[in-house]
Image: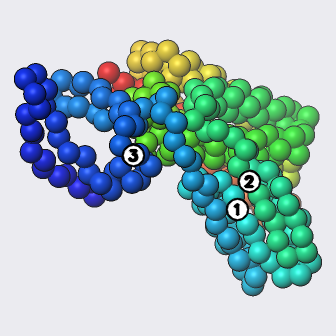
Amino acid sequence: MIGIEVRKLISFGKGSYIVSMPKTWIAKNNLKKGDLISVSDEGSGLTLSVNQHQDQKTHSKEIDIDAKGKNLEFLRSEIVSSYLNGYDAINILFENNSKDVPKIKNIMRNLSGLEIMEQTSTRIVAKNLININEISIKNLIRRMDIITKSMMEDCILCINDVCNYDSIAHRDIDVNRLYFLGYKVIKNAIKNPSIAKALEIEPWHLHCDSFALLRLEKIADRQKRIARYLCNASLDSAFLGELHKIHTDISLAFNEVMKSYYNQDKQIAFQIDVSNKDRTASCDKFLEDYTNAHAISKTKGGNSNLVAVAKIVENLKATTAEIRNIARMVLCYE
């Protein structure tokens, strides 16, 4: 909850006025007498922020995480949370020569800018080496977009039995790394308006970029799952052809919605939003046709294929829903 303080305006000389500053804000930003404050005139309001050229002492944030007796997934959440919360150093403490050390190191390697600087038999020290105030969110989104498009293209190749699932899975990890980095940048900009100003990003656009990052991460994750189920399924040529068409249509919609996002083109976004029902209906019809054609199959392999197809369709529908969500966000631009 934002606290609002009322302060009295004091006349100072013939043409100036002064107002006292909250001591807590001064302390939080490490300011002292004589330091410069940036003042931005916004009509009915003034925004005060620490001057970007002001030399300030930066305090390193450090956290110790005790890994002893903890589930690896729980530990992963702790490490990622510490990374997103801006800790400059993360120290992992564990039992002597723990067998989980390689997995812990792998978690850290999947977080952009977090580098392992020291390792002993009971401790890993990782430090953040990236200045997130210099990261371009738009560039992160474009990189995620390019990687996700390539994953979609390779998913279509999987339908034609030319699948490299490991490559797709590795690219999903790259998208995750970019997502976490982008989330960290946006959180920092929201907490510190002067950083958002330096990046020339308005609050609403920060929200939109955060939304786009999440949608791209989810779309990439869906492609990984589709590829995995395709690798485990054995489908008839006729159904493979129909699946190829459905996925290609969804891929084209993704290309168009990202174009609308970059250009803030509401007309394209509107078409994507309206046509989403058709893409969803195609997915439903495909699953219905496949189920009817293989309903008499009682074999274990037949049931396995049916489950795989249902999972593929589920992820295709989720992909087109995320594409629609991006389109609806574009429609909210003013």
**Which of the labelled discs sits on residue 127, or is there none?**
2
Disc 2 to disc 3, C-alpha distance = 29 Å
Q: Residue at x 43, y 42 (%)?
A: 192
| Residue type at numbered disc 3 | Lys
Of 245 and 88, nearer the camera is 88
Q: Residue at x 29, y 26 (%)?
A: 40
Q: Is residue 225 visible?
A: no
Of 63 and 239, nearer the camera is 63
Q: What secondary structure is found at the residue carrying circle 1?
A: strand
- Is mark 3 in CB contact (under 8 Å) with mark 1? no
Question: Which label lies toward us, 2 or 3?
Answer: 3
Residue farthest to the bottom? 69
Disc 2 to disc 1, C-alpha distance = 6 Å
Question: Which mark is first along the chain, 1 or 3?
Answer: 3
Circle 3 residues within 10 Å: few <14, some 14–19, many ≥20: few
Question: Which label lies toward us, 3 or 1?
Answer: 3
Q: What secondary structure is found at the residue carrying circle 2?
A: strand
> Viewed as shown, does residue 154 lie left or right of 43?
right
Question: Which mark is first along the chain, 1 or 2?
Answer: 1
Residue 312 appears at what percent x and percent y?
70, 47
**Which of the labelled discs sits on residue 32, or is there none?**
3
Question: Which mark is first along the chain, 3 or 2?
Answer: 3
Q: Which residue is mark 1?
A: 90
| Residue type at numbered disc 1 | Ile
Residue 162 appears at what percent x and percent y?
91, 34
Q: Is residue 323 visible?
A: yes
Quadrant of the rendering where the N terminus is positioned: bottom left
Q: Residue at x 82, y 71 (%)?
A: 123
Image quadrant assignment for residue 107: bottom right
- Is mark 2 in CB contact (under 8 Å) with mark 1? yes
